[in-house]
Amino acid sequence: MQPIASPLTRRRLLAGAAGAPALLAGLSGGDAAAQSGGTVNFIGWSAAVDQVRAQISAFERATNVRVNYENFPWAQFRTALVTRLVGNAPIDVSWISDAWLPEFVEAGWLADINDIPQLMRYNADAADYCTQSMVYRGKQYGLAYYGDHMSFMYNTELLERAGITTLPTTWEEVVQQSLRIKQQGIVEFPLLLSLAADTWLIEFVSALTYAFGGRMVDDAGNAVMADANRGAVRAARFIREAIATHRILSPGAVETGEINGLRAMGSGQHAFAIVPTYRIRALNDPSQASAAGKIRIALMPKGGPDGTNNTLGWIRFYGMTPAAKADRARRERAVRFMEFFGGRDTGGNYSMQKLLLTDVGLPSCALPVNQDADVTAFWNRWAGGGAVIAQQAMLAKKKDTIAPWFGEWVETSNQAWQAVCLGRAEPEAAMRTAAAKWTELRRAFR
Amino acid sequence: MLARLNRKFGYDERSAAILVFPVVAVLLVVAAYPILYSFWVSLHDIVLTRPLRRPFVGGDNYLRIFGDERFWLAVSRTTVYTVVTVVVTTVLAVLVALLLNETFPGQRILSAVLLVPWATPSVVNGLMWKWIYDPTYGLLNALLLKVGLIERYRAWLGDPDLTLMLIANAAVWKQMPLAALLLIVTMKAIPDDLYRAAKVDGANVLQRFVHVTLPALRPGLMLVLVYETMISIRHFDLFLIMTQGGPGDASFTLSWLIYVETFRSLRFGTGAAMSYVLAMATFLLSWAVIRWLGKRI
């Protein structure tokens, strides 16, 4: 018979301490196993965290599958994800940026979903541009989290004060109207571009390059950004002149990140800006912006002789790891998770897509979502209607610089664009530097 | 074997070895192994996004670094930053130490206040100075505008000619108090007799500083110079928070280059090689300072 109580010796205490975590793990694991249909390990960046958590709760209730959810700030996410993948961390599903797709596929970190009809059927509902952004070498690697594009936004109040009644349709008109606003002393820098050397810079300059009818890389994968007529030189020169010649764009643009740009536009200090479309909600929310109610979206102006209304579009999506796909049970759970979040929930609704749009403003790739009455009401309330946004979305083009070496190249590209802004390099020379790095990395990859 | 060891080493030596062993084992695991492993990594072409290939390249990574113009740009930026930070910190620290070595009302309070910047976490320091330099709502702009030194707000950190100096200013603000503290301790140890004898010989204040204080300060100065050099040459947090190496390449220092190469480009091989170069440079500089000042102590 065991004594009811025994003296607490140091050895007993140490043994107890060592055994406790194992005991707890066993209890919780057993408990979880008994109550749920397994676990999905999901990793994302720190965006829409409340909405994700809410959807996770709904998913767990509907499927009895538990979700381990981890998130990291966007700025560190790629590094955090890569180090976990290299270390064979048990990740089933992750948010992926379209910019990383070739790099991750070549590294063997993403599994294609072509043989999973349960997910592929959502292509019928998705905008074609979104689907194409998830395709690499003929295979599709995920289901959309959201798809967005760069929009040209303006402040109605500042334009009214300057007596401007027609919206600019070209970047030359943007310059003229900005000069008019500046000369009247309404604001010092009417144009806002966020050109800090961070992950957003390539998105902004690509949008401007497309508007000037240029490209960074041609269809064959050759760098054409330094080409005077079909490259990014015209866009680069426009930025340089906006800063140095017309003084309508602040020299401080080189230290303005996307978030700070958003705040500056929201404070009513700028008349025109290029901003991700999903920010329109924050810009017109009185609790977040003093210029609320005055920010509207127009079609991207055309720039130069070959200008277009095109803009840059991008997509973030749910990707599955090969390890998850290789295990039947993990694959089943991961597919259910991806469908519930990127497709329809168990009730047949695009609940996550709608939640992200109506709560955060993230546009959906699923076309039926845009027919929803709540979504229409959302665009009417925050953007004065969704017609221009829909029209611009049709003119969005994905980044032509997406390649396995994108992550390395973009560092050089960012420096080249900043050198142009600072007047440290001529647009042609800066683009030649970026093009040379592209060619070097491309060769090295072969 | 055991008996032979017992005969060779006494009880005290064996006890000492047993007691020291855990620390040695921990150091081997957390210090020696990573150092050796990172050197091994520096001899391979490891790119995290290409996990299936990691060829042994010997010294190629080192050769590649020395042939990379970004590296030499980073070296020049780091040199300027280090020299400015160390010199300004040391000069200010000497002046502050001289002041606080005197007895005057409020001296104790001033000494305590002086430690506030040093106690401020580095990240907070970076954010604070970024806020001060901000082009739209920064305190510096407001102050200079008020006293009429500028006509409109300026993007201080957006000016590539000023960026490095502005970051150095933030670093000096944080590092100077500790340097001053170290020098005060040294100053307190200077015998008053030396000053009295100098006065008797007719030495004025400046002569007493040059011929009495400064030579006696050498041990403290050596410590400050070595410490500040080691800190400044490897500074990273201020660059991450305030400029991210920009604008353009204006604040592209060695530490920043290592970060970009390792954690953005995910080239761990060249990143490790650069880290070794930086470590060796720090070691050699510190050794040179110790040799140079050590001879004069």
Image (cartoon, rainbow, N blue to C red):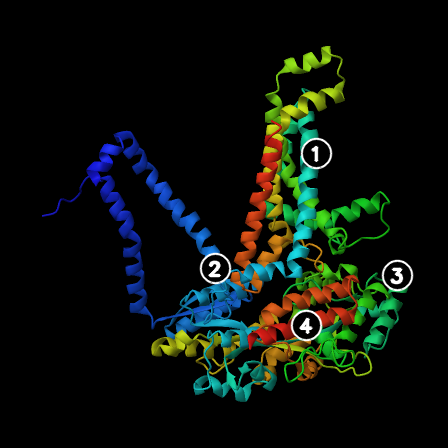
Residue at horizontal 76 percent and vertical 83 percent from the top: A308
Ranked by sequence position, the earlier of labels 1 and 2 is 2
Tell me if A9 is positioned left or right of A412 in this view. left
Residue under numbered circle 1: B91
Q: Say if residue A382 shows up in the picture.
A: no
- Which chain letter matches label 1? B
Q: Nearer the viewer, mark 3 or mark 1?
A: 1
- Quarter residue A276 falls in: bottom right
Mark 1 residue element: helix
Q: Determine which residue is flagged by label 3.
A: A185
Do residues under tags 3 and 4 come within 8 Å of each other at their CB atoms?
A: no
Q: Which mark is residue A267?
A: none
| Co-location on one chain, circles 1 and 2 | yes
Residue at (27, 56) in percent of width and height: A23
- Counting from the top left corner in percent of width and height, residue B175 is at 63, 39
Residue pointed to by mark 4:
A436
Task: Indicate the position of residue B290 as horizontal and vertical percent values.
Answer: 58, 35
Q: In which quadrant will I find the C terminus of chain A? A: bottom right
